[in-house]
Amino acid sequence: MELNNYPVLEDHISVSEIVTPQGSELLIYDTVTGVKKYPNRAVFNFLRLTTGTRTFGEIAEELSRQSGEPIEEIWPGLSKIAEQMVNDRQLRVSETPLENPRTPPPSARMIHRLENVSFETTRKCNLRCRHCYSNAGIELEDELTVDEIKKMIDELADIGVLAITFTGGEPLLHPHLFDLMEYARKKPLSVLLFTNATLLTPETIEKLRELQVFQVNVSIDGPDAETHDQFRGLEGAFEKTVQNVALLQRAGFRVQTSTSVTKL
């Protein structure tokens, strides 16, 4: 590590602090793999400064001011931590400052960390499921705008949320779904999709892969077409869903299925 280089967190790495009545939780989270690591306070203080606008030397000076320790004592340990994080693909190093720096990791006061949020992206849906809890089908007149949704995503990131699930209705019917997913990935957040899978295509699956969507959750409410299609209100839904689950698996996605258990 060189003192005149600029460290910055990798794009897929989230760092945050949640201050609870029980104490502080410091977390490094990989939004692609879901792996969590819990740094100590010294490492967290270092990571709060790795926005791509300060050199290692400037960061060491700031940490020296915070701790009262001389830079000569800080730098060896700091250099070793940085090298390990680069090897673990959590940190990268630039020879010049970034034009678009990272925002500092958030620190929020909460009762406990809110890790995952499910967001009903739209009420619009192409199915008429007998058990639908949101009475989906027709788009609501006052659904959130794209700007309003992005503001919500900003607020979720600011309080240390780790993942957002786009659900519905059927989220694939939202005209700006991939734009919203891309925005969430840049926060960075893990992105999950909860879908009936009938509208998936090889092209949309490739787009989901490019966005590094963490997991796709698919509804399957019967072991065969007779049961599933009757429950979902669309003939042929079972066949499309099963075919697209196979496409998702071949593309390397984590696929989770959700089933509503009923007397039927």
Image (cartoon, rainbow, N blue to C red):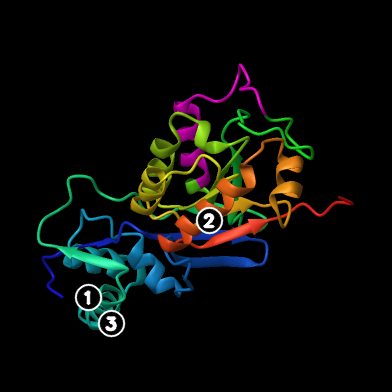
Residue sitting at x 26%, y 77%: 87
Look at label 2 and name its amino acid.
Val
Q: Which residue is mark 1?
A: 71
Asked whether 155 falls inside the magenta stretch, the response is yes
Q: How many marks?
A: 3
Q: Earlier in the sequence, mark 2 or mark 1?
A: 1
> Judging from the image, what secondary structure is the residue with disc 1 in?
helix
Q: Position of residue 152 (x, y in %)?
A: 52, 36
Q: Which residue is mark 3?
A: 77
Badge 1: residue crowd in 10 Å (few <14, some 14–19, many ≥20): some
132 or 12, nearer to the observer: 132
- On screen, 156 above or below 64? above
Look at label 3 and name its amino acid.
Gly
Asked whether 77 falls inside the magenta stretch, the response is no
Residue sitting at x 25%, y 49%: 101
30 or 24, nearer to the observer: 30
Task: Give the magenta-colored segment's residue range.
Answer: 137-156
Residue sitting at x 76%, y 38%: 133
Q: CA distance from mark 3 to mark 2?
A: 47 Å
Q: Position of residue 111 (x, y in %)?
A: 68, 56
138 or 122, nearer to the observer: 138
The reply to whether residue 248 is visible in this rendering is: yes
From the viewer's perspective, tell me whether residue 3 is left or right of residue 91. left
Q: CA distance from mark 3 to mark 1?
A: 10 Å
Foreground label between 2 and 1:
2
Q: Which residue is mark 2?
A: 245
Residue 99 sits in quarter: top left
Q: Are marks 2 and 1 in contact (CB under 8 Å)?
A: no
Residue 112 sits in quarter: bottom right
Look at label 1 and name its amino acid.
Ile
Badge 2: residue crowd in 10 Å (few <14, some 14–19, many ≥20): many
